[in-house]
Every structure is written in structure tokens, then in C-alpha cells.
């Protein structure tokens, strides 16, 4: 038995994996990873895989990065963890100072959670609670965009819009207001991104005009709807949204959990619209992809609405056991050092240009509707019919074929439905980008070559975060 098989069998006997139909593993081998270095992962049999999805979008400076490793090693000998209520420590103070400095002016307070979904819960609760504290209890609904994703906990799911969840867990969800997304994949032929995003804003304007008295906040994934298939839109939408939120007295929550820290080509996506949200949610790349940590930044105005005598019961009594964990903060500090010392945002411009040129030919592929890109995120959307942009039935799991081909060639490409995307660590080289493009092209050829016959079960719905 190979070492891979050995670990796979032990794993499958006891684990239940995330976002996985476990029965798939009767056919699809699990890949046990022994070690990582830079953009490469290595399994127990010595095969290497280029991590094109940054291990679910978290890694930015490679696996086993020596600078981040060292910082964590130093921290672990000092202090591994301490309660953050009533106590503090140097890494969390330094990190908060740096996040306040790095983010748009006016985001002056940092509240920590320990993963993206709970960070969204913090933002939603804070916004609702703010309106309660200032005497506007009617403001308790949230406005969301279609095709959005904000995490897996129940309130975070409520503000998301993924059929798989809204269907299954409908009975548990909050009542939200859903507005059509500015997603430019659906723009009419001949229309540019800016014009389409601007036109789509009319729906948001109408929703806010009608409902603002009962709305606490609008929540968006700025510029890229990640889990919804790397769908993208123009920053003008965010600018218009900021103005409307101000006009109607509604909070703006930016979920930059996936796009923060350089992914869109600027450190934060909101910079491209020149705006400051009322809540900025950060996680994923915050620790360089090392440890779970999330930060919800907000304004002094919000903070002051909670600041009062204890007996008024206005405090925000939310907490997580590992809030502000020192090891995670140390990893985040090392990550921010690398951004600063290596002028990463500037260097990434060359990498994103290479991602564009290496994949440009795919736009002519008979089963590719679009190759789209925002900074260090590039997506290729496979379709059944190019002219009408008709999607493949999800049951055909075309993306899974790309995934399997890529694995055989030594790359971790994990399409979202029929959307093949690159979201690589920023330490990828130009040659490695070319390799990925080659593997993706081959995979797309294979996946779109034949008609696939599948039994289509009733109740068709979109897959999500899944290679299917
Ligand atoms: C991943 C993600 C989340 C959830 O973060 P977790 O750490 O997985 O809970 C929320 N919002 C967006 C936009 C994400 O991509």
C-alpha cells in the first residue's frame, strides 16, 4: 500500500470533510499532504501540486514561509494564548494599530473573531445593535446581493444567496431583502462593466428608497463575488452604494474576507471606489493563510453608541474563546511586514498581467463564455453554448474533470461549478503561471469535449465551493 493510500484509509475511517459529499471518495482519491513549500504542496508519495487556489483563498506568501514561521516560533515561546476580555497582549495591540493605519481613514476600532463567518455575525449584530442603541429599533433587516456568499453560520448564510443553502436551510434563515447583483457576466452584449454596474444600481436605489426605515445595513462582497463563481463588477457600484447608504441612513458592510490583502490589485477593494464602509470584515489572508483569525473594523461613531455606563446595558457582549489569539496575530504581523518590505501590491501587477496573457487564448475556446480578471483573481467560465452563455447542467460536473486532470498534472485547481479560476499565492512565478494556464487549457478541452450523459435528479440546484 502506498503511503498516500495508508493515510487516505485512516482518514476516511474517521473524518467528515467540509463541503464534501463523502460518497464521492469511493471514486475520487483523497490527497493527503505531507508538506508544503512556497506554492507547492507535496503528498506522501512525493507528488507535488501547485496550489492555484491558495488553499481556499487564504495563502498569500506560500506554504512554510520562513519569515512567518519564525514569527510564530518566537511568539509561541512567549505566550500562546490569553483571554482577551480584561487582558491584552503586544501582538493584538500592534496588529490593531497597523490595521487601523492600513485601512481607509475613519475605521478606527478593531473587534476580533476567529473565522470569516463569525466576523460577519459580528458586523450584522453590531449594525443591528447600533440602531437599537441610538433609538431606531425598526432598523433590523439586511440588504444583500443575489449570488453572494458571506459564510456558513446561520446569519451569515441568511445574507448569502446560494441556492444549495437557501433551499436546504430556508426554515432557519433571517428575512433579508435581496437585490439583483451587478455581476458583469450578465451584461448585455456591447455594454462595458462600468455602464452595466451603474445600470444595475437602480435596483439597489429602489430597494433602499422603499425599505430604508427598516434596514440596518447593506452587505456586499466588493468587486468579486467569490464563492458565487468569481463573478465581478465595477467599483462604480460601490461608490454609488456608499452615497445611497449615506443618503438613506443605512450602514455599509464590506465583506473583504476573500478580496482583502491585495487580491483585487489594491490592498483593499474599497480603495478602488475611494470609499470607507462602516464595517470592514477581514480574515483569510490576514494571517498569510496560517491560522484562523478575523477582524471587524468599524468607525468611532459606531463604537461611541455602545460606550456608556454598564447599567445601560449597551455593551457589545459578543465573544469567541480564541478572540485575538497571539499566535494568529503574530502570523498576521509577519504577513503585513512582507506586504510592506517586498512592495507586494506593485510586484503583483506583473503577475496579474502574466495571468492575463497566459490565458488570453481561452477566450476563443468554443465552450468558454468569458475570461475575466480583477487583479490576482482570474476566472474562465465554461458553458454549454457560447453565444447564449448557457450553463452546463450542474449534474454534469464538468469542473470536476478539470480538477482531476489538474491533479494528474500536478496542480490544485478546484473549479466552482463550471468556473475554472486561478487565485494563486503572490509568490508564484511567471513560469508557474504559464504551467497553470497550460494545465487549465488541457483540462477545459477534456471537460468540454463530449456530451456527458447523466441522470438528472429532481430539484436541480447550483453546486457551490465544490469541484463539481
Ligand atoms: C470564505 C468567506 C467567508 C467565510 O469565512 P470562513 O472563515 O470560511 O468562515 C465569508 N465571506 C466571504 C466573501 C468569503 O469568501
Image: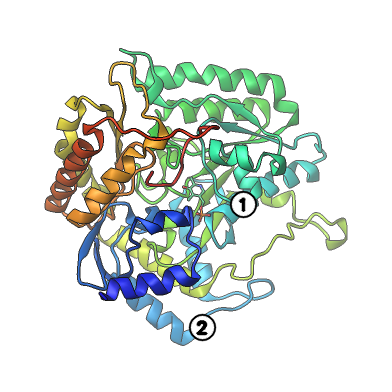
Q: Nearer the viewer, residue 238 or 440?
A: 440
Q: Residue at x 19, y 36 (%)?
A: 445
Vertical placement of residue 104 versus 321, above or below: above
Number of residues whose C-alpha sits closer than 10 Å to that of mark 1, classed few (under 14), some (14–19) or many (20 or more): few
Residue 24, position as x, y percentages in the image: 41, 53
Q: Is residue 265 visible?
A: no
Q: Are marks 1 and 2 in contact (CB under 8 Å)?
A: no
Q: Is residue 442 left or right of residue 16?
A: left
Q: Quadrant of residue 137?
A: top right
Asked if ligand 1 lies within 8 A of label 1, the reply is yes
Number of residues whose C-alpha sits closer than 10 Å to that of mark 2, classed few (under 14), some (14–19) or many (20 or more): some
Q: Earlier in the sequence, mark 1 or mark 2?
A: 2
Q: Residue at x 47, y 71 (%)?
A: 13
Residue 287, position as x, y percentages in the image: 42, 63
Q: Nearer the viewer, residue 321 or 270?
A: 321
Q: Quadrant of residue 62?
A: bottom left
Residue 428, position as x, y percentages in the image: 21, 55
Q: Check disc 1 and report the residue beneath it.
A: 153
Q: Check disc 2 and report the residue beneath it.
A: 79
**Secondary-structure class at tag 1:** loop
Q: Residue at x 50, y 71 (%)?
A: 14
**Secondary-structure class at tag 2:** loop
Residue 438, position as x, y percentages in the image: 14, 44
Q: Residue furthest right?
A: 311
Amino acid at each position: 500500500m502506498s503511503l498516500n493510500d495508508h493515510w487516505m484509509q485512516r482518514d476516511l475511517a474517521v473524518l467528515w470533510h467540509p463541503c464534501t459529499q463523502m460518497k464521492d471518495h469511493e471514486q475520487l482519491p483523497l490527497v493527503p499532504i505531507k508538506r508544503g513549500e512556497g506554492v507547492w504542496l507535496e503528498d506522501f508519495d512525493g507528488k507535488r501540486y501547485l496550489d492555484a487556489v491558495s488553499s481556499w483563498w487564504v495563502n498569500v506568501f506560500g506554504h512554510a514561509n520562513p519569515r512567518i514561521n519564525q514569527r510564530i516560533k518566537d511568539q509561541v515561546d512567549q505566550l500562546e494564548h490569553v483571554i482577551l476580555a480584561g487582558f491584552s497582549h503586544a501582538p493584538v495591540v500592534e496588529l490593531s494599530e497597523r490595521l487601523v493605519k492600513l485601512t481607509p481613514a475613519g475605521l478606527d476600532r478593531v473587534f476580533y473573531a476567529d473565522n470569516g463567518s463569525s466576523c460577519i455575525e459580528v458586523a450584522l449584530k453590531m449594525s443591528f445593535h447600533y440602531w437599537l442603541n441610538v433609538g431606531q429599533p425598526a432598523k433590523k433587516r439586511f440588504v444583500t446581493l443575489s449570488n453572494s456568499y458571506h459564510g456558513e453560520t446561520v446569519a451569515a448564510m441568511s445574507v448569502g444567496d446560494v441556492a444549495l443553502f437557501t433551499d436546504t436551510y430556508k426554515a432557519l434563515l433571517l428575512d433579508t431583502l435581496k437585490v439583483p447583483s451587478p455581476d458583469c457576466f450578465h451584461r448585455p452584449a456591447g455594454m462595458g462593466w462600468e455602464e452595466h454596474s451603474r445600470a444595475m444600481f437602480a435596483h439597489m436605489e429602489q430597494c433602499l428608497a422603499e425599505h430604508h426605515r427598516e434596514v440596518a445595513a447593506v452587505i456586499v462582497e466588493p468587486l468579486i463575488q467569490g464563492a458565487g463563481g468569481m463573478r465581478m463588477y465595477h467599483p462604480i457600484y460601490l461608490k454609488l452604494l456608499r452615497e445611497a447608504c449615506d443618503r438613506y441612513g443605512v450602514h455599509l458592510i464590506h465583506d473583504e474576507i476573500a478580496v482583502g490583502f491585495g487580491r483585487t490589485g489594491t490592498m483593499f477593494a474599497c480603495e478602488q471606489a475611494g470609499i470607507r464602509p462602516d464595517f470592514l470584515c477581514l480574515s483569510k489572508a490576514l494571517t498569510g493563510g496560517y491560522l484562523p483569525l478575523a477582524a471587524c473594523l468599524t468607525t468611532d461613531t459606531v463604537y461611541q453608541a455602545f460606550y456608556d455606563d454598564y447599567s445601560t446595558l449597551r455593551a457589545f457582549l459578543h465573544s469567541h474563546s480564541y478572540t485575538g489569539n497571539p499566535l494568529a496575530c503574530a502570523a498576521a504581523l509577519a504577513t503585513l511586514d512582507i506586504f510592506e518590505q517586498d512592495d507586494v501590491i506593485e510586484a503583483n501587477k506583473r503577475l496579474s498581467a502574466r495571468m492575463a496573457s497566459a490565458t488570453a487564448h481561452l477566450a476563443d475556446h468554443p465552450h468558454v463564455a468569458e475570461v475575466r480578471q480583477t487583479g490576482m483573481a482570474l476566472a474562465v467560465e465554461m458553458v454549454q453554448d457560447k453565444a447564449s452563455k448557457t450553463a452546463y447542467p450542474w449534474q454534469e460536473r464538468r469542473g470536476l474533470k478539470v480538477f482531476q486532470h489538474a491533479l494528474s498534472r500536478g496542480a490544485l485547481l478546484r473549479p466552482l461549478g463550471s468556473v475554472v479560476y486561478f487565485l494563486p499565492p503572490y509568490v508564484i512565478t511567471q513560469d508557474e503561471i504559464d504551467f497553470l494556464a497550460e494545465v487549465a487549457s488541457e483540462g477545459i478541452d477534456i471537460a468540454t469535449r463530449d456530451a456527458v450523459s447523466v441522470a438528472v435528479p429532481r430539484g436541480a440546484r447550483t453546486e457551490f465551493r465544490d469541484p463539481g
